[in-house]
Image (cartoon, coloured by chain):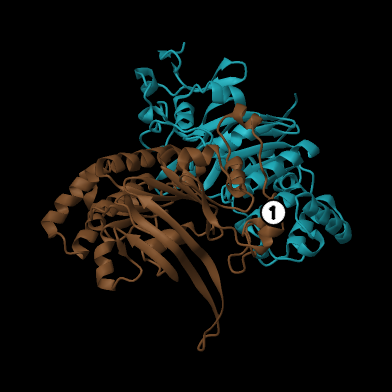
Amino acid sequence: MTLSDNVLLHVDKLVKHFPITRGIIFQKQIGSVRAVDGISFDIYRGETLGLVGESGCGKTTTGRAILQLQKPTSGRVIFEGIDLVSLEPKELRKMRRKMQMIFQDPYASLNPRMTIGEIIGEPLRLHGLANRKESDEKVVELLKLVGLNPSYANRYPHEFSGGQRQRVGIARSLSLNPSLIVCDEPISALDVSVQAQVVNLLEDLQEKLGLTYLFIAHDLSMVRHISTRVAVMYLGWIVELAGRDELYTHPLHPYTQALLSAVPIPDPYAEELRKRIILEGDVPSPINPPSGCRFRTRCGLASDICTDKVPEYREVSTGHFVACHMVA
Amino acid sequence: MTKLLDVKNLKTHFNMRGGIVHAVNGVSFHLNEGETLGIVGESGCGKSVTMMSMLRLIKSPPGKVVDGQAIFNNQDLLKMTNEEIRKVRGSRISMIFQDPMTSFNPVLTIGRQMTESLEEHMGMSNKEASDRAIKMLSMVGIPNANERMNNYPHQFSGGMRQRVMIAMALTCNPQILIADEPTTALDVTIQAQIIELVKRLRDSLGMAIIWITHDLGIIAGLADRVAVMYASYIIEEAPVKELYRHPSHPYSMGLLKSLPRVDQTSGHRLASIEGLPPILYKEPRFCPFSPRCVYKTERCLAENPGLQTISQGHQVACWVDVNTGKERK
């Protein structure tokens, strides 16, 4: 496959299994949690790819495996033409400047003993890109950029609210001028009225700096608002991927359909008219996923072929990928 | 419609190091028989504390209910003896919580925890109680209820645990079920299961529900009437359709506008409410929302508006008519 110039990140059959071991001294692997099990997708320059799914489906692991924070079990992650999986640690460190992460919990992801200025300036100093003075200047610039008062640089994280801390996390991720930012549930810990502030900031920054986002979230309404394209994950697989409007108006996979119908709409009239597809049961364990199609245990359309054969992840119309036997 | 519960001017204070936090500031609301009341607000706005105060579950010190009444079946919950309120809690009024893991006792089986309240409140024998518990578990959709009675809470998934909690809350046929963000910790498909279940049970058992949440989406499909809380006050109350069609407090309006919808693509930026909710160390002499409000006038800074009725069943605490931009009389 040739990579067109537009593709910033190409993920090819990415697999991440976590071993389950028994024994203390002589550890024996007795199984594995198949958190991410062979997913492929591209992220284009300047777009926002939304990655949605329920807890435990592997979205966060996908984000971490892309950034090589967790070494993938197999597969390739090609970022700006370079395969990150096979890179030497020293080379990888250089590449890390170009890809950053924003975390879910703004309380846990900032070191309470460092000032805001130190937190934001740290990446610059660690990578040896700026001396003290330059880094201080950059911190002021970044604080302004994310809508915080530059005089806050000497304060500590506990003095800030959740929304402000998330702004600090965003400023830190921007300090090395990255091209890709993995946003791992950046707003789910925030209050409703503050969520919109942070989402607007992310959109403004994308426009100003030409950033590319992988936006991992479970809030399907917010993902519809912010994404260019959306991928839906279930139990370690991407089951459907399409352009934002295509996915939300013509979902093909039964799981996507059920997921979308389950999201409440803040409008009592719309709620009255809605038909919900209620999925039975819970998500199966990723240690021992169902044979064939992983969704078949909760699927209303499942038949014999779904038990026997793994559905192929294929393009059914331009840019619309789905993994389901029942989709024509 | 008969009023089942009538709460008037409830005030709760917490004595903290930084001063006295006014967590509930003269909150009044009522609940009719068979009705579902939604209470919406952001974290820290006082929605849970209001319920806890009413049921006398506030830990004292530091908390104290300093004023108000909560009339239930012609009796004031706040004036009951400890013995009397114990009889109401868990039998006439039950509560389900956000995190089902922390609301169960991890070292007792589900069966034991369910039969306890039946034996305590209904005076059932062990056998009767366990039969009733199994019946309740099957009703909320727990497969093999008979065997699951011997399981411990950690052996259930999040959604199943919430079902068990609902079964437990309903064992004594309560008149009121208070649901404090019961689906916040759950995934959307599981949330949809739980909401369907609660609706079905409400219709078949005829109980009234107070549903506390920060999610305006859930309330839209579930509640008959909605009260919006901000900074320890109820700032707007209306029938559900009226509130979503004609929100009349700048805060409710802002919240509704800031929400993206799953069924529509909004081509524009989300409207956001700048600033943060306050913590009240004293009763404000001004409107508590005024620091974040785009409609504020001089009067808002000088006087705290109380709730006033603007149309049938629609009350709002704002000096400004947001539709015209002019001050109300």
| Residue A85: quadrant of the picture | bottom left
Q: Is residue B271 visible?
A: yes
| Residue A128 point in image, percent of width and height | 17, 64
Q: Residue at x 59, y 22 (%)?
A: B242
Q: Viewed as shown, does residue B225 lie left or right of B236?
A: right
Vertical relation: A41 (above or below) B192: below
Q: Is residue B206 visible?
A: no
| Residue B163 point in image, percent of width and height | 70, 52
Q: Viewed as shown, does residue A293 lie left or right of A36?
A: right
Letter of the chain in cyan: B
Q: Chain A is which colour?
A: brown
| Residue A258: quadrant of the picture | top right
Q: Which residue is mark 1?
A: A302
Q: Secondary structure at mark 1?
A: loop
Depth order, front residue of A166/A114:
A166
Q: Residues within 10 Å of mark 1 (few under 14, many from 20)?
A: some
Vertical relation: B237 (above or below) B11: above
Quadrant holding the N terminus of chain B = top right
Depth order, front residue of B206/B70:
B206
Q: Residue furthest top?
A: B329
| Residue A30 point in image, percent of width and height | 58, 79
